[in-house]
Image (cartoon, grey):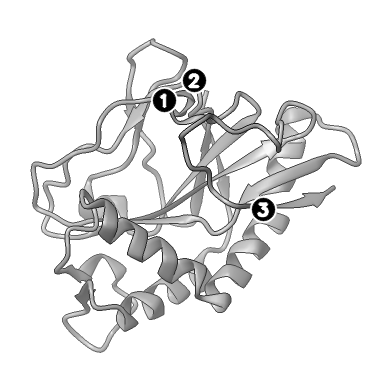
Amino acid sequence: MPSSIRTDLVPLVGEVSKLLATLNIGHFPTADLADLHSYVVTTDVFRNFKARQKLYSAVASCPSLLSIYEDVIVNAVIPHIKEVGSLPTPTTYWYQYPPSLRLQPGPSPHHGKTHNDAIYGHQDGEINFWVQLTDFEKTQCALMVESSPEKGDFKPLDGPLHTIHMFHGTRNRHYAPPNNSPHTRVSLDFRVGIEPYFDEGYRMEGVPQHTRRSCEF
């Protein structure tokens, strides 16, 4: 079953806004970068692979954003995993670095396909995290996740801002529904591998993997 973490994500949202303001994939209609949902996307970063890779590379080249991301990992995400999993001390965790930033402009009928992450070489020892950086009340659009494998009871990872959603995406199917609102949905996602259930050396042949960093708690 998915669970969630409440924490202060204002610094993270601010860094994402500043990064987007520097890229040529869109623009903010005013000088106010606080309204992240108002970002006007001019490049198909939702469906186009090359555009998504450009955004991924931009995140990887933004040390201020990555520093705040690692603070969230260390101070919010890993303590939550440790608590709900009753994990011993020390335990090694491998977290995706950099995370994936997603932009889904609306209104649009386009949606992501339903899948689990095992088909992309992800392991049972990895946990997915999905962070809604824009207000669900404005976009009415959030990742849809089933509660257990093949159950089909998809529900949105909605909720207030400053919520980090956790689910087992390796087995549980999920997809991005259409964004029917006039706003842009912005989210961040990443995975964390957990000792001893995660094999850092495993690679599915022919499938590229995210780079990772590790820490011990």
SS state under label 1 = loop
Q: According to the image, label 1 marks what residue? A: 116
Name the side, left or right, on which 45 lies relative to 6: left
Mark toward the viewer: 1 or 3:
1
Inspect the image, locate mark 2, and give the three-letter code of the amino acid beneath it: Arg
Q: According to the image, label 2 marks what residue? A: 171
Mark toward the viewer: 3 or 2:
2
- The residues tagged by marks 2 and 1 sit, at their Cα atoms, a distance apart of 6 Å
Say which label, 1 or 3, has the lower sequence index. Answer: 3
Q: Nearer the viewer, residue 169 or 10?
A: 169
Residue for point 71% across, 57% down: 75
- The residues tagged by marks 1 and 3 sit, at their Cα atoms, a distance apart of 25 Å
Residue for point 46% across, 36% down: 207
Labels 1 & 3 near each other (Cβ < 8 A): no
Q: Nearer the viewer, residue 141 or 216?
A: 216
Q: Residue furthest right?
A: 89
Q: Position of residue 198 (x, y in %)?
A: 70, 31
Labels 2 & 1 near each other (Cβ < 8 A): yes
Label 2 crowding class (10 Å Cα cut-off): few <14, some 14-19, many 20+?
Answer: some
